[in-house]
Image (cartoon, rainbow, N blue to C red):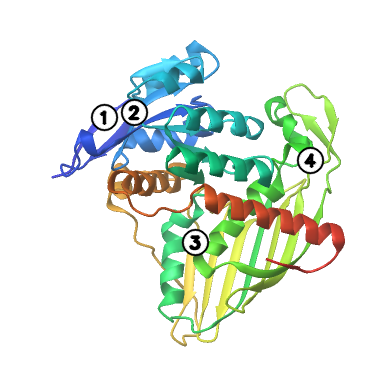
Amino acid sequence: MPTAHSMAGFVRFESGAKHMADNIRVGIIGGNVNGWAGRAHMPAMAAGIPGVELVAVSTTRQESADEAAAKFGARYAYDNHHDLLANPEVDVAAVAVKLPTHYELTKDIIAAGKHVYTEWPLGTTVEQAEEMTDLANAAGVRTCVGLQSRHSAQYQEIRRLIEGGSIGDVLSVSLTQFASGALARPSGRIWMRDADAHANTLSITFGHAMDGLHAMLGPARSIAAAVSTQTKEWTASDTGERFSVTSPDNVIVSGALANGAAFSVYIASVAAVGTGHSMQIHGSRGTITLDAPGSTHLGAGELRVAVDGGNELRPAVAPEDEWVTAAGLSGPPVHIGKLWAAYADAIVNDREFHPDFADAVEHHRLMDAVQRASDTGRMQEV
């Protein structure tokens, strides 16, 4: 029977069917309690992802590494990633740091012979992504990229409804997402102002949104796009210093999916009050909508459906994994945790897994096609 015990303020779900030998042992590079790893990866692991054990964390300061290890139950804490990679108890190393360092850290992990998880975007360019993929394949290590939207219970339920014919043929898809706070950023995030850093609304927010659409509806076939920078200046919220901005903050894409449906996506970081996420999928026999206050790759929204010829949208519940419900997880740890569970199962049982680095390469190519469509004003076949 599943049992629960308290650990550092978290409830951990344990299944008697899992043994230590069946777990993948994870070390997180960038395991700061105040960073993305501290908001998503480590809370999920502390709650008890099936088949996953957090054993080590590294940051650039021993104090912050010790803090994370104590809070989330890791046995080892390091002030550098080299010591983490030298630990034979680490099977998989995760890169959860700023995008410009993904490339070198990922290569170090592969060279150490560890399986590797790297956050999306995989690299700053498609060429970097291709090189990392080739290196991982040559080394025989399993890879995962942090595109977690496809593990959303709501996205999986939408895909089930579509594949089951509940809304008939998919005719059109519309997705909008407007996040507030574009004018001010903490000093630690000002580096994202430079378009050459490739950490922006196009690569990150739009990238996650399009991966979710792909998971539900299949890939795009052709796209037209307008990518722009509407907010030309940011203010460091903690110092008041002002900085010029070249990073894109508005992405408008329209076109056709491979299944023939028309689609449009508008993702923006706006100056004043954001209105959140809104998606509509219209079919010949029904409609599906998903609305949320923020990005749905970070958490659940309100799912409503009108199916099988019905003419009224009704709330719908997407069944969640048992371990997620038992652990009481919500928000960012949920989709990340389910991604880790699938990755662990693929490693232990030698199963096919997605999204891997090869998927990331294809997604990088899509981002490049969007930028090219905007730059040239011409429809791109993808």
Q: Amino acid at mark 3?
A: Glu
At horizontal 30% and vertical 38% (from top left) the residue drawn is 48
Residue 195: mark in rendering: 4
Quadrant occupied by the C terminus: bottom right
Residue 9: mark in rendering: 2
- Could you give the CA–CA distance between mark 2 and mark 4, rounded to whole angstroms? 40 Å
In the rendered image, residue 308, in percent from the top left (x then y), is placed at 43, 85
In the rendered image, residue 327, in percent from the top left (x then y), is placed at 30, 42
Q: Which residue is mark 3?
A: 302
Answer with mark 4 or mark 1, whichever residue precedes in sequence: 1
**Residue 297 appearing in the image:** no
Q: Which residue is mark 1?
A: 6
**Residue 319 appearing in the image:** yes
State yes or no: discs 3 and 2 in contact (Cβ < 8 Å): no
- Could you give the CA–CA distance between mark 3 and mark 2, rounded to whole angstroms? 28 Å
In the rendered image, residue 347, in percent from the top left (x then y), is placed at 34, 44
Q: Amino acid at mark 4?
A: Ala
- Could you give the CA–CA distance between mark 4 and mark 1, rounded to whole angstroms? 44 Å
Image quadrant in which you'd find residue 156: bottom left
Q: Amino acid at mark 2?
A: Gly
- Seen in the picture, residue 2 relative to 68 is either above or below; the reply is below
* Residue sticking out furthest to the left: 1
- Could you give the CA–CA distance between mark 3 and mark 4, rounded to whole angstroms? 33 Å
Q: Is residue 172 left or right of residue 224?
A: left
